[in-house]
Image (cartoon, coloured by chain):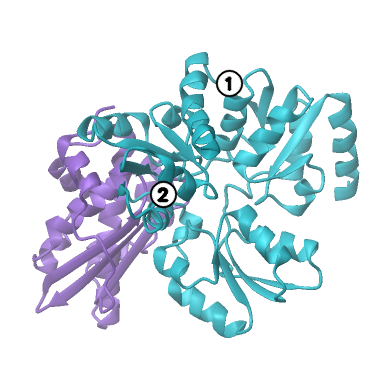
Amino acid sequence: MLIVEIQREIQKLKKERNVCVLAHSYQSRDIIEVADFVGDSYQLSVEAARAKQKNVIMCGVRFMAETVKIISPEKFVYLANPTAGCPMAEQMDRDLILQLKEKNPDYTVVCYINTTAELKTVCDVCVTSSTAVNIVNKIKNNNILFIPDYNLGKYIAERCLNKNIKLFHGGCPTHAKITTNDVEKARSAHPGALLLVHPECIPDVVKSADFVGSTSAIMEYAQFCSENEYIIGTENSISEHLQFICSDKRFYPLSKDMICSNMKATTLIDLFDCINNDGGEEIKLDEITIIEARKCIDEMLRLGKI
Amino acid sequence: MQYSEKVMDHFQNPRNVGKMDDADGIGEVGNAKCGDIMKIYIKVNNGILTDVKFNTFGCGSAIATSSMATEMIKGKPIEEALTLTNKAVVEALDGLPANKIHCSVLAEEAVKAALYDYYKRNGIEPPESLKSCSGCCSSCSTCEEIIC
C-alpha cells in the first residue's frame, strides 16, 4: 500500500469511528498530515477537550496521552504506540518527590508538564515550557522545587530572580546532549542563520542562541521573522516541518543527533492499527489520580489568568 | 519504595558536579530507554585521580550513584578506581530500590569508560578488566540483563 492510501483509509475510519487524532509536533510528516490537531502537549489536551469526538488517539508519548485523559476523563483516550514513553517524564517517581517534600516543607513543588500522571498527583503547580517563567513568577511562595528538567529550571531561575529555586539533574536526553561544539559547527556551516533553541538544552547552548522558546514558539518565530535561514535547536522533525511550511526559507538542524527515538516510535501503521482496534493502548487512570493530577494543571491555569 | 537518607542527600546535594576542560579521561555512558546520560571526567597526576567531575541528566538514583562513585574514586590511585563495583556504590548509598540498581551499573561503567579513555589517550594498554567495556552501556551485555 502507498502512504497516501493508508492516509485515505485513516481519514475514512476517523469519521466512521468518531475519532480525533492528535499529533505532537515531533511526529513524522505522514502522521501530521492526517491529524486533526498538531501542537505541543498542552495545546493538544486543550484541543482534545474541545473536540466533539468521544475517542481520541494520541500520536506522541505516554505522558501526553495521560494529560489528555486527565483533562478529558469522559473520553476514550488511546496511545497509538504503547512503547512510546518520555524518559524525562519518568525520571522521578512519586516516592522520591514525597521524600523531597518532607525534607523541604516550605517549598512549592513545580513540575514540568513532561511528567507522568502519577508524579503530577504529588506536585503543586504544573508548567509548560512556554508558560513556565510567567507561572513561576506568579507563585506566592518564593521557595520553589522544580522537577524534573535541570536545564529548563535553570532557564526559569535566571528569569525569576526573586525566587529561590532548587533544581535536580533530570533532563531530556535528546536536548541535553547538544554541546557548544555543535553550536560552533552549525554556526560555521551556516554563518548567516539565526539559532533558535529549546530551553531543555544546556545553559551554554541556550546562552548562545538568538531566540529561546518552546517548540511552538520556535515555529512561530521562524515563520514570522523576516530572516531567511535558521538553525533549529530542538527535535529534528521541526526543521523538516518548517521547511514544508516556509518553502522560501532554509532550516538546518543544530545537530543530526537531535532525534527522539520515542517520538519516532509511532508510525502511520501504528495509527492505522489503533484506529482499526488492532493496536494501541487505551489510557486508563483511576479517579483519584485524575482528580489529584488535575489540581496542579488547574493551578497553572489559575495563575496564568492572574 | 523508600530511598535511603544517603541517596536523598546525594540527589539533593550532588558532589563533584561539573565538566572539566582539561580532563585526562572522559567516560560517557547512557541508555536511551531510561534516558540517563552520565559523563565522568578524570584528572590524573602520578597515577592518582586528583580530580573527578560528573555531569549526569537522569533519575534521582542516577544522580546519587554518579555523585557517590566520584566521591569513592577521587584522590585514589588508578588501580583502586579500577576495582570500583556497582555493588560497592549501592552499599555506600545504603541501598537502592531494586528497579534502580541499573543506575549503579551505569556509574561503574562511566568510571571504567573514563579510565579506558585515559589509557587510550596515553597509549597504554588497558588492563584486562577494562577490555570488555566499550564505553557505551547500550552494548554491554552485563547491563542489558538488568537494565530497565
| Residue for badge 1 | A284
Marks 1, 2: nearer the viewer: 2
In front of the other: A108 or B126: A108
Please give the letter of the chain rendered in cyan: A
Total number of numbered discs in the rendering: 2
Residue A135, horizontal then vertical, whole percent: 47, 43
What amino acid is at disc 2?
A: Asp
Q: Which residue is pictured at 43% across the width and 53% down the height?
A: A152
- Residue A279 seen in the figure: no
Name above or below for residue B84 compared with residue B25. above
**Could you say whether the residue bearing mark 2 is in a helix, strand or loop?**
loop
Tag 2 residue? A149
Q: Is residue A220 visible?
A: yes
- The answer to whether marks 1 and 2 sit on the same chain is yes
User: Is B141 situated above or below B4?
Assistant: below
Using a 10 Å C-alpha cutoff, classify the residue at mark 1 as few (fewer than 14 neighbours), some (14 to 19) or many (20 or more): some
Q: Is A286 on the left-hand or right-hand side of A165?
A: right
The chain under label 1 reads A
- Please indicate whether residue B58 sits to the left or right of residue A250 in the image: left
Q: Relative to A117, is B10 on the left or the right?
A: left
Q: CA distance from mark 1 to mark 2?
A: 26 Å
Look at the picture and state if A94 lies above or below A248.
above
Give the numbered dot on residue A250: none
Rendered position, A10 above or below A166: above
- Chain the render paints purple: B
The foreground one among B2 and A106 is A106
Q: Quadrant of residue B125?
A: bottom left
The x, y position of residue B9, in whole percent, is 18, 43
Task: Say whether disc 1 or disc 2 marks the residue closer to the N-terminus.
Answer: 2
Foreground residue among B90 and A110:
A110
